[in-house]
Image (spheres, helix red, strand yellow):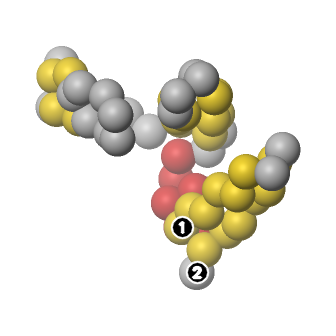
């Protein structure tokens, strides 16, 4: 089941089970996209998102 949050006309939809694992979650608007931070430890690897180049670490 999904959880829906609305803030300043933006709608955020996330999986409830995943949300429980990664809380707290912070979403920052960066002018041309969003940066999402959480307590989830990803452990390296590569990532990318729309309009940005990925990084590996």
Q: Nearer the viewer, residue 19 or 28?
A: 28
Q: Secondary structure at mark 2?
A: loop
Where is residue 53? Give x, y as percent. 23, 26
Q: Earlier in the sequence, mark 2 or mark 1?
A: 2
Q: Residue at x 61, y 63 (%)?
A: 13
Q: Which residue carries the number 2 mark? A: 1
In the rendered structure, are the residues bearing label 2 and label 1 in contact, judged by CB atoms less than 8 Å apart? Answer: yes
Residue under the image location 44 percent in, 39 percent down:
40
Cα–Cα gap, marks 2 and 1 = 6 Å
The residue that label 1 is drawn on is 15
Image quarter for residue 6? Answer: bottom right
**Which of 8 and 35 lies nearest the eye of the viewer?**
8
Q: Quadrant of the C terminus?
A: top left
- Relative placement, left or right, of 8 versus 19 is right
Total numbered labels: 2
- Image quadrant assignment for residue 15: bottom right
Front in this rendered view, residue 48 or 24 = 48
Residue shown at 23% from the left, 35% from the top: 47
Label 1 crowd (10 A; few <14 / some 14-19 / many >=20): few
The residue closer to the viewer here, 40 or 57, is: 57
In this rendering, does residue 42 appear at all? no
């Amino acid at each position: 089941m999904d959880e829906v949050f609305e803030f300043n006309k933006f709608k955020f939809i996330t999986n409830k089970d995943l949300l429980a694992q990664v809380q707290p979650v912070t979403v920052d608007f960066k002018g041309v996209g969003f940066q999402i931070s959480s307590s989830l430890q990803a452990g390296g690897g590569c990532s990318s998102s729309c309009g940005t180049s990925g990084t590996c670490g």
